[in-house]
Image (cartoon, rainbow, N blue to C red):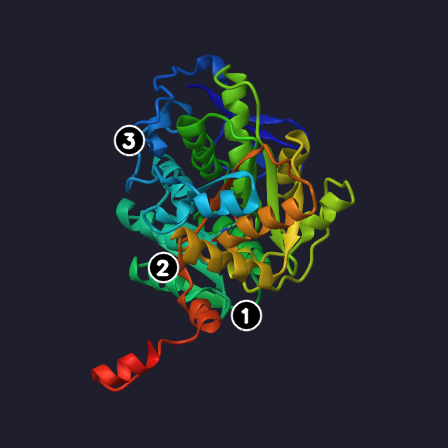
Amino acid sequence: MDFKLRCIDCNKEYEREDIYTCECGGILEVKIDLNSVNLDFKFDGNNLSVWKYGCLLPVKIKPVSLREGGTPLYNADYLSEKLGVKVYVKHEGLNPSGSFKDRGMTVGVTKAIELGKGAVACASTGNTSASMAMYAAKAKLKAYILLPSGKVALGKVAQALMHGAKVIGIRGNFDKALALVREISEKEGFYLLNSVNPFRLEGQKTIAFEIVDEIGVPDRVILPVGNAGNISAIFKGFKELKELGLIDSIPKMTGVQAEGANPIYKAFVEGKKDIKAMNPETIATAIRIGNPVNAKKALNAVYESKGVVTQVSDEEIINAQKMLAAKEGIGVEPASAASVAGLIKLLKQGEIEKDERVVCITTGHLLKDPETVIKVCGSPIEVDANIEAIKAVL
Ligand code: F0G
């Protein structure tokens, strides 16, 4: 399969693969020559995984894989009945490291090996770092991670440490960490695996492929938006399928941001294609991002698919997290619940038609952020070790 890197701003194309931005400063995407693809899979609902769709992924060597993808697409019966629309939940928390990032990392780390890199690096609100550390371990690469100190959920830090990465907390937010890791990677020759890396996003587009494989094209896909890579990647996946003639339509791409970290929402409301950076704050630390690098790609995806961007409060996020856990049996971290909180809000606002089939993406697992759970649910009741004491609290 042939492909080039192409700037989304000036359309300049590059044969070389070891760059992240264009000379003009614009971000790059992988432009696949779809005529050169040897389509060797069928949408038959079987054997779902990232590498089922390997013929649409731009790598040339055997992938570094931990069996990512193939996540369940649940019929959300409770939500469907309560809300009066057909709701599916694709639970990306059931990937190897517990988030959708593994889809991108299997491709990104494979590309690092292909390019002969000895070390990988990222800034992260947590999940990217956990995933990168895991795949770097598998690939025997060194891993360097910059985190916003004190603002990353415990489960994610634990993963990054245990998988053997060098984990550095900076006194600053994610946006600052990303600026720093871009600079240090350039100086030290580390392969950067944030979503400015166009190859990582290629892996994430397989979320679209798996949805189509199981249920065809839904009317709408709703997901949380932080650095805005995932919404861009999923849109690209649908678009490629349409260009290949495998599907006829593209779902309305619908992004949800936290009220305290909402630069893309603000740009959308004003009909703009550029964002104004802000100082972010939200309980959903995974999407605590004020200057998303993929904002332009994401806004293009939303405008082109006739979707929307909405915002939800921390309270709405926690209510949706509790509802998913207690009523659907789906355990997700706060940022992931933003998708369902956004669905509820958009239905109330009359933005979503009652006959739509909607897929909410839940991006990370409940166990990623145990501290927030204890904060919002309280600790277990403690009693003496006898039947009377237990009966008294039943
Ligand atoms: N949900 C979760 C659980 C995430 O970890 C992230 C991003 C997002 C949603 C937003 O995805 O950035 O593609 O718009 N986490 C990154 C990280 C920033 O470092 O783990 P996005």
Disc with the residue nearer the chain's start (1 vs 2): 2
The amino acid sitting under disc 3 is: Lys
- CB under 8 Å between discs 3 and 2: no
Name which of mark 1 and mark 3 comes first in the sequence: 3
Residue underneath mark 1? 171
| Residue 342: assigned label | none
The vertical placement of 188 against 274, above or below, is below
Within 10 Å of disc 2 (Cα), the crowding (few <14, some 14-19, many 20+) is: many
What secondary structure is marked by label 1? loop
Real-space CA distance between mark 3 and mark 2, rounded to the nearest whole angstrom: 25 Å
Quadrant position of residue 380: bottom left
Viewer-closest of 329 and 368 = 329
Task: Give the camera-side residue of 148 and 72.
Answer: 72
Q: How many residues crowd mark 3 within 10 Å: few (<14), some (14–19), many (20+)?
A: few
Q: Position of residue 108 (x, y in %)?
A: 41, 40
- The numbered dot on residue 62 is 3
Residue placed at 41% from the left, 19% from the top? 1
Residue at left 42%, top 63%? 369
Q: Count neighbours of disc 1 (C-alpha within 10 A) and say few if under 14, some if 14 to 19, many if 20 or more.
A: few
Quick one: SS at disc 2?
Answer: helix
> In this view, which residue lies farthest toward the bottom?
384
Q: Is residue 271 visible?
A: yes
Q: Assign the C terminus to one quadrant of the image.
A: bottom left
Give me the disc on residue 160: 2
**Amino acid under label 2?**
Ala
Between the C-alphas of marks 1 and 3, the distance is: 39 Å
- Say whether disc 3 or disc 2 marks the residue closer to the N-terminus: 3
Residue 317: x and y in percent read 55, 58
274 vs 219, nearest the viewer: 219
Which residue is pictured at 43% across the width and 54% down the height?
327
Q: Determine whether, in the image, residue 107 is placed left or right of residue 285.
A: left
Q: Is residue 125 visible?
A: no
